[in-house]
Image (cartoon, coloured by chain):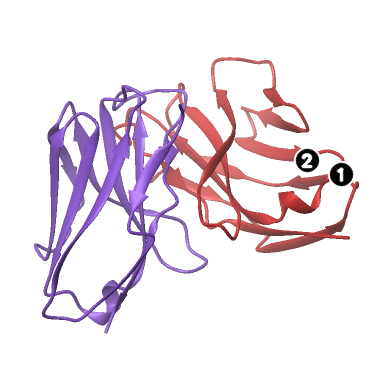
Amino acid sequence: DTEVTQTPKHLVMGMTNKKSLKCEQHMGHRAMYWYKQKAKKPPELMFVYSYEKLSINESVPSRFSPECPNSSLLNLHLHALQPEDSALYLCASSQVQGPTRGAFFGQGTRLTVV
Amino acid sequence: AQTVTQSQPEMSVQEAETVTLSCTYDTSENNYYLFWYKQPPSRQMILVIRQEAYKQQNATENRFSVNFQKAAKSFSLKISDSQLGDTAMYFCAFMTSRSNYQLIWGAGTKLIIKP
C-alpha cells in the first residue's frame, strides 16, 4: 500500500466558512507534509509534522491550522480564507523527516475560495 | 542559496521517441538527494526516480534514466520510448541537510507526447 489519500478532492468555500482537509497514509511513515500549489508552479511547503509534532511552519497565515491526530492522519483546518488562497493543496508523507527514498503525495484537494 | 533550474518550460515529442529533460542545481553541500517527480493532469505528484549524490552510478527505472554529472551540478532525465501517458509536468527537486531535508523544487517542464 503506497497510497496517500486526501479528501475531499474538490472544495468550494466562502470567506466566512470553516472547513477541513484530510489526509491519510498507512505506510508507517512518520513525517507528513502540507503543500500549496498554484497552477503551473511547483509546490510550496506549508507545514511538516515529524512523529506527530509540528516540525516546520513556513510562516503560514493563522487562517491555516494543521493538526496531526495520530501517525496516519493529517488535517488542515481552514477559516476565513481569502480568494488568493485558492489552490491545489497536496499532502505528502515520507519515512522520516530526513534523507529518504522520497515523499509520496496524495492527489490533492482543489480549493476554491469565493 | 540553494536553487534548481529547469531551463525548458515546455517540450513536445512524438510517441516512441526519446526525450531528455534538463535540470541544474546549485548547492555547496557535498551530500544530497536528487529527485524527478511527474505530475499528470490527474494532479498526483508521482516520484519517477531518485539519485543519491554519493553514488556515481546513474539511476534507472524502466524507461526512465538520469544523467547525473556531479561536477557540473546537472541531473537530466531521459525518457525512452515515450508514451502518451508520459504527458505531464516534470519537476526536478533536491534536498540537503542545509534545506533541513525539505525538497527544493525547480519550476517544472511541461512535456507533451504527441500521437
Residue that numbered label 1 is attached to: B18
- Amino acid at pointer 1: Thr
Give the chain ID for the purple colour.
A
Of marks 2 and 1, which one's residue comes earlier in the chain?
1
Residue A33, how many percent across, how many down? 29, 42
Q: Is residue A54 left or right of residue B68?
A: left
The answer to whether mark 2 and mark 1 are in CB contact below 8 A is yes
Q: Is residue A10 left or right of residue A2?
A: left
Q: Secondary structure at mark 2?
A: strand
* The C terminus of chain A lies in quadrant: bottom left
Chain ID at mark 2: B
Q: Quadrant of residue A12?
A: bottom left
Chain ID at mark 1: B
Residue that numbered label 2 is attached to: B79
3D distance between C-alphas at marks 2 and 1? 6 Å
| Residue drawn at 27 percent across, 72 percent down | A85
Q: Secondary structure at mark 1?
A: loop
Q: In the rendered image of this protein, does residue A54 appear above or below residue B22?
A: above
Q: Residues within 10 Å of mark 2 (few under 14, many from 20)?
A: some
| Residue drawn at 57 percent across, 28 percent down | B50
Asked whether the residues under marks 2 and 1 belong to the same chain, the reply is yes
| Residue drawn at 54 percent across, 35 percent down | B35
